[in-house]
Image: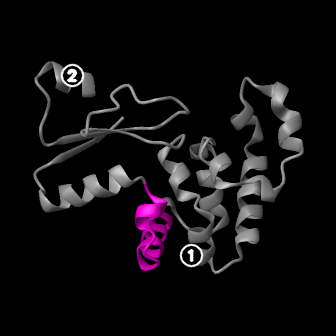
Amino acid sequence: MYRHSLREGGWSNSFFLEDGDNEGSPFPDDKHFIHLDKYCIETYLLDVPTLSQMTDESEDVVRHLILQCILAKRNQLLYKNRFFEFLVDGLQADHLTPDRLALLDSSLIMDSLVSTLDTNFKDFVDTYIATAKTADRLEEVMPAALVSTLAAVGAAPEADVAAS
C-alpha cells in the first residue's frame, strides 16, 4: 500500500506502520513510513514495569507470567526452528530483558497473556495505555514515531492511518 501511495506521488495525510520483524526499514528516511524497532506492535505491550503497575503485581511475577505464556506457545514460536527447543527448555523469567523481549514475536503470546489476566484485548490495551500515560511513560513504552504521529493525527482528524 505504501509503494502504491508513492507511485501516486505520496498521500500527504497518510501514515504507514510496519512491524520490525527483526529487519531494517525499507524506507528509513520517510516520516510517513513508521518501521517499528521491535519485532511487532504487540511487543510494545510487554513493558514489565507498566504491566507490573497495571496488574498490581511485582515485576518478577509479571516476568513469570510472560514466561508461562511463552512456554505455552513454544511450538508456534519455534515453528521451523525446532533445533532451538533446548534453549526454551532453559529459559528463565530473569532472561526476559527488554532487549530480548524486543526480538520476540509477541503476537503469538498476546492472546494467552490477555486471557491469563482475565480480560479482552481491547480492555487490555486501553488499560495498558492509560497506565503508561498515568506514569508519564507513554513515550518510553510505545514507539516515539508512533506516539508523535498519533498526536499529529489527533490534531488533524482528516489524516488516514494505515497499518501493514
**Region in magenta:** 122-142
Q: Looking at the picture, does residue 131 appear above or below residue 63?
A: below
**Is tag 2's residue or tag 1's residue first in the polypeptide sequence?**
2
Label 1, secondary structure: give it: helix
Task: Write down the residue under mark 1.
Answer: 54
Residue 93 percent across, percent down from the top left: 79, 58
Q: Residue at x 24, y 60 (%)?
A: 151
**Mark 2: few, some, or many residues within 10 Å (few <14, many ≥20)?**
few
| Amino acid beneath label 2 | His
- Is the C-beta separation of discs 2 and 1 under 8 Å? no
Q: Residue at x 14, y 61 (%)?
A: 155
Q: Main secondary structure of the magenta part?
A: helix
Is 139 one of the magenta-colored residues? yes
Q: Is residue 41 above or below residue 4?
A: below
Helix, strand or loop at mark 2:
helix
Circle 2 residue: 4
Q: Residue furthest front?
A: 29
Q: Is residue 11 left or right of residue 34?
A: left
Q: In the image, what residue type sits under mark 1?
A: Met
Q: Is residue 26 left or right of residue 92?
A: left
In the picture, residue 86 is in which quadrant?
top right
Q: Position of residue 18 (x, y in %)?
A: 39, 36
Quadrant occupied by the C terminus: top left
- Report whether residue 118 is seen: no
Q: Is residue 85 magenta?
A: no
**Residue 19: x and y, percent?**
45, 38
Tell me the distance, in whole angstroms, between the alpha carbons under discs 2 and 1.
40 Å
Image coords of residue 74 (percent x, y): 76, 40
